[in-house]
Image (tube, rainbow, N blue to C red):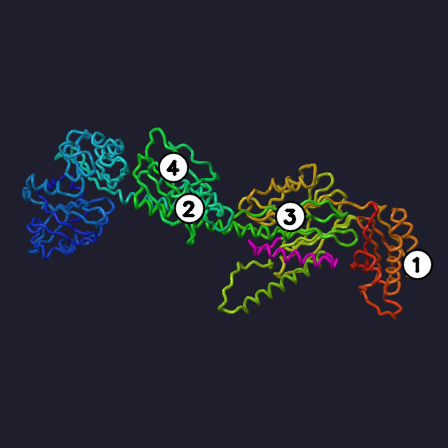
Amino acid sequence: MGTHDEDDVPRRRFDVADAAPLLIDARGVVTSWTREAERLLGYPAAEAVGKDLAGLLAHADAGRVPDVLERCRRDGGWTGLLSARRRDRQPLALMARITSADEPGGPARWLVLLNEMGDAPGWDMSRSALEQMVGGSPIGIAIVDTDLRFVWSNAALSRFGGGPPERRLGLRFADVQPGLDAEAAEAQMRHVLETGESVVGYEHVGRVRAAPHQETAHMLSFTRLDDEDGNPMGVYYTVVDITDRHRARQRLALLDRAGRRIGRTLDIARTAQELADVAVSGFADAVAVDLLEGVLRGAEPGTGRAEGGGVKLRRVGQRSAAGYEPLTGTDAVVAYSEGAPPVSCLATGATWRAERLGPEDWRPVLPPVGGEHAGQPSVLVVPVRARGTTLGVTTFLRRPAQEPFSEDDVALAEDLVSRAAVCVDNARRYTRERDAALVLQRSLLPHRLPEQDAVEVAACYRPADELTGLGGDWYDLIPLSGARVALVVGEVPGHGIDAAAAMGRLRTAVRTLAALDLPPEEILAHLDDVVARTAHEDAAGTDAVDDGAETMTDGTEAAGSACLYVVYDPVDGRCAMAAAGHPAPAVVLPDGTVTFVDLPQGPPLGVGGPPFEAVELELPSDSTLALHTDGLLARGEEWALDTDRERLRRALEGREPSLELRCRTVIDVLVPDRPHDDVALLMARTRRLSPDRVADWELPADPAAVAEARKAASRRLADWDLVELVFTTELVVSELVTNAIRYAEGPIRLRLIRGRALICEVHDGGATAPHLRHPRTTDEGGRGLLLVSQVTRRWGTRFVPDGKIIWAEQPLTGAEM
């Protein structure tokens, strides 16, 4: 017989009273055999039990069994025609009906009802036999008429509330279960009556009359009953209690929600609040999270003991459902007296539970309950413990109308709190490390930028948020010879204390190299060598560590660092700069126009690549240079280098009364309070030394020019009212000019600069730097530079394209600038 025979089934008579029942498992193996089945097919139970259903069928239908079982699993049952093979090998046409016989928590089973398709109706089952079979089922079964009123139900349905079967007769679903959503259940029944489509696995959640404080869940299946003419007579439905399964799903959903929502940041207070938000109202009606004071500072928790006994905690997270008045304000200090359950939880690390809370003296710190929710709530106090350390307590409350906390709830609450506790402890440890890194970094950054004549400066630094961790951005201002100044901004890869330490090493290296007075591209070339060599030495040192030794590092090093080095000369307004993997600076001209320097990008430090290139430009006085790290240009999740310069342009076009305020405004406009990466901004407004503060002379390479140079310098000092510096200046000029005439080549030029110090410079065409010597008493010469070093604050040599400059600097003690 083929599958098309199923179409005839609704038109044929299927009398349950005449059916031969048997049970099969999910694989189609016979697990229970009845006398009716033995009478119909001829097999005794010993031969039938354990046999595949396919083994009882004719060859033509044996192959249909897997498809029939699949349709049973998909549709909840199956009805159709099958060709069986009796024990005496005689074929037998059967009408079969397969329905679920599952028990809650048990394996899948199917009830197979077989009717012989012949003239005889089969065994005439009595009403009492039929009621024994259906009424004795452990599954709740009921039949309602077309008005949805009960006409029959079995005894098992009474376990779900609503009274015994005789009390249900003539009543509606809402009459016997007023606490449940009767409209939803009856809507399913009407759908079945109207369409004839069965509804399988409909879940219904509510509170039955038998357990008003407990939320229960049931699975219902609805099937229409038709008379012999195919007209609907009513609805047959079954009920299975799936409350345990429903609660398990709720717990898994709560834990899944907790996993996604708790610990999204490394902020202690926010993590505690996330725990309270997750638990209300899916688990509790009110939650309070109280932590020891030291935890919030990143320190070890301590005991929290207060004078006179008891414990003081700080409330860092709280949430209450509708009907509760607000809890004690967040960040408030909560005092628990000696002997209160939270105190014992802190001491023992064990959870405390009360099905109904009595008038304990610690009750005032919990949310008051009034109105319809008045009464004694159920309370659960769970210690917040991580890595063997108690950090605080979490208090859960349920209103009196809810089911009290059970032992299963204790396990769930402990799981929730333990997840949050690990996040809180991670945040505590991170807070301690981040504070230490921030202190280290701020100690390595300039506390105040030195005063000088070249530029007016302002700087802002904003650290990264707690998830990313503190980075290695830095800035510096370094005074150079000749009233010039070096402006530096850089960034070290990585985050945390290691990044801050690497930043400090790199800044020290830059300051050391700046003393050589080299052009920017040569400074970066030397710095690149230093970083590469250090990285190689660190790698070699790591390889040499004994395998048995345990080391801890996050791999942060200076290799890959970025740096921008700018030199500005206030005498002629010339500015030279070079970059190593760093954004070019912006320039705000005196009229407010914002431009960006077209600066060739060199490779990051220590990674190798083409040589660094410098550009030189002349800046008008009152121009503003804006040097920044790449975090200033970031937006959203696009943390890329040199992006979205229009935002920076608009921010720099703003007019502010001071450079300091302008610098802070740019940071506030472009950077969030907790940026993804560190941001450093150094703004420098250029100055020009007036011509009357600079004097220079061309000198012939003739020893007689030394006397003229001294006289010219004396006259200029007199014009500058620096008569007290004439003697030492004449000595410096004499020695430096004499040295140039004696040892150098080409033209000689003398220049005096009156700034915050008096600077004397002698330029010659030589390429050899002079050396300071310490002559013996009997030596006739070699004391010139020694004398210069003794009478000046500092001196040195810098090389320029057409020679070198020897310079000396004297403080303007007692003289006005």
Can you tell which of label 2 and label 4 is closer to the viewer? 4
Q: Nearer the viewer, residue 493 or 421?
A: 421
- Judge the density around disc 3: few (<14), some (14-19), many (≥20) Cα neighbours within 10 Å: many
Q: Mark on residue 363?
A: 4
Can you tell which of label 3 and label 1 is closer to the viewer? 1
Can you tell which of label 1 and label 4 is closer to the viewer? 4
Q: Nearer the viewer, residue 496 or 69?
A: 496
User: Residue at label 1?
Assistant: 705
Residue 357 is situated, as x and y percent measured from the top left of the image, at 33, 38
Residue found 46% across the figure and 36% down from its top: 329
Q: Which residues are magenta?
A: 491-519
Residue 528 is situated, as x and y percent measured from the top left of the image, at 65, 60
Q: Mark on residue 260?
A: 2
Q: Quadrant of the C terminus?
A: top right
Residue 642 is situated, as x and y percent measured from the top left of the image, at 61, 48
- Judge the density around disc 1: few (<14), some (14-19), many (≥20) Cα neighbours within 10 Å: some
Amino acid type, mark 2? Arg
Taking 24 as reference, is 536 above or below it? below
Q: Is residue 665 left or right of residue 794?
A: left
Q: Mark on residue 716?
A: none
Q: Callout 3: helix, strand or loop?
A: strand
